[in-house]
Structure formats: structure tokens, C-alpha cells
């Protein structure tokens, strides 16, 4: 199971690198073509925008797994162990609810827009909203796994403060 999870997150990181490369090529190529040859790539703006949306959401999945998001832990660090557990459960419960809302809304938008074609590329507009479903399902699993680890006693007191310190001081 760990092998599959590691492979999934490695695949996400590779996809992010690929999306970034596609964005650079499309935008830089379009700029060069416009200034040097008075031409351009018709779909570059649309596809680079879609790549950016996917890049942000995939990066948020990886950030969620690595606890790399910004947060304020000033209060939680001062609480006793039971208070940290209570805050952990409350915050994860709220995040599960928000993620469920985002996932169901993204799925509804994906279905609504699947037959709508983008103006420049002709691709389905549903692809833009599908990343919300990918994000939501992934984050639901991450949050649920964290709660299961807590209930099974596999989390130390340091793990209850779900913010990783920055390497920069």
C-alpha cells in the first residue's frame, strides 16, 4: 500500500513538472512567435491557463500530504495533549466538510460543462473542473488517513500540530 501511495505522489510531482514545462513552452513560444514572426499559437493562452489550474490543485494535494501549507500554531502548541487532539479532530472535520463540498461541486460542474467546448482548442470545458474532483478525492483520503492514524494511536504529540516548520529561519 505504501508503494502505491508513494507512486501516486511521485506521479503527481512528475505531472506538475510536466505541466510547468508545457506552460513555459506555450507562453514563451507564443511571445517569441508574436514579436519575431507576427504570428502565434492560437491555443497557448487557453492551454497554459488550464495547465496552471491543474498545477495549483496538484501542488495543493502534495502540500496537504506533506503538511506544507501555511498555518498558525501559536495556540495549539500551548495546549495539553487532549487539547491538541481536539483541535486536530475539529480542524480535520472542518477540512473534510469543505473538501466534500468542493468535490461534489466540482463533479457537478464537470458534468454540466462536459459537452461545452473551449473556444480556442475545442476541448471539453469539463477538464478544468475535473481537477477539483481529483483534488477532493485525494485530500479526502489524506485527511481520513490522518484521522485513522489518530484514533489508532499512531500519532505522537508533535504530529498533532499539523504544520511543518520551514527550513528557513
Image (cartoon, rainbow, N blue to C red):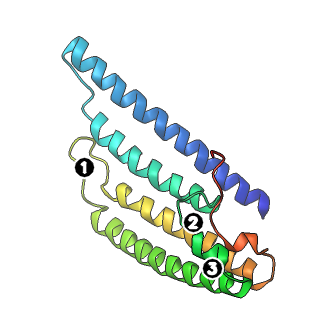
Q: For residue 39, which quarter of the picture?
A: top left
Quadrant location, the N terminus: bottom right
Kind of element beneath mark 2: helix
In the image, 82 versus 90, the foreground residue is: 82
Left or right side of 3 for 48: left
Kind of element beneath mark 3: helix
Figure check: 107 above or below 84: above
Query: What's the residue at 50%, 62% (across, down)?
Result: 134
Q: On the image, numbered disc 3 is attached to which residue?
A: 88
Residue density around tag 3, few if under 14, some if 14–19, many if 20 or more, within 10 Å: many
Q: Position of residue 123 (x, y in %)?
A: 31, 48
Q: Position of residue 118 (x, y in %)?
A: 25, 49
The numbered dot on residue 118 is 1
The numbered dot on residue 138 is 2
In three-dimensional space, the C-alpha distance between marks 1 and 3, rounded to whole angstroms, equals 42 Å
Residue density around tag 2, few if under 14, some if 14–19, many if 20 or more, within 10 Å: some
Query: What's the residue at 66%, 48% (across, down)?
Result: 10
Amino acid at each position: 500500500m505504501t508503494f502505491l501511495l508513494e507512486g501516486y505522489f511521485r506521479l503527481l510531482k512528475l505531472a506538475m513538472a510536466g505541466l510547468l514545462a508545457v506552460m513555459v513552452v506555450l507562453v514563451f513560444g507564443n511571445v517569441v512567435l508574436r514579436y519575431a514572426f507576427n504570428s502565434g499559437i492560437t491555443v497557448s493562452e487557453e492551454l497554459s491557463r488550464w495547465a496552471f489550474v491543474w498545477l495549483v490543485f496538484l501542488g495543493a494535494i502534495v502540500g496537504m500530504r506533506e503538511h506544507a501549507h501555511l498555518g498558525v500554531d501559536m495556540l495549539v502548541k500551548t495546549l495539553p495533549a487532549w487539547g491538541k487532539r481536539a483541535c486536530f479532530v475539529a480542524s480535520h472535520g472542518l477540512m473534510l466538510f469543505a473538501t466534500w463540498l468542493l468535490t461534489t461541486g466540482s463533479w457537478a460542474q464537470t458534468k454540466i460543462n462536459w459537452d461545452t467546448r473551449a473556444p480556442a482548442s475545442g476541448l471539453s470545458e469539463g477538464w478544468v473542473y475535473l481537477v477539483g474532483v481529483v483534488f477532493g478525492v485525494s485530500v479526502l483520503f489524506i485527511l481520513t488517513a490522518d484521522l485513522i492514524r489518530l484514533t489508532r494511536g499512531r500519532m505522537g504529540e508533535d504530529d498533532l500540530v499539523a504544520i511543518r516548520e520551514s527550513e528557513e529561519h
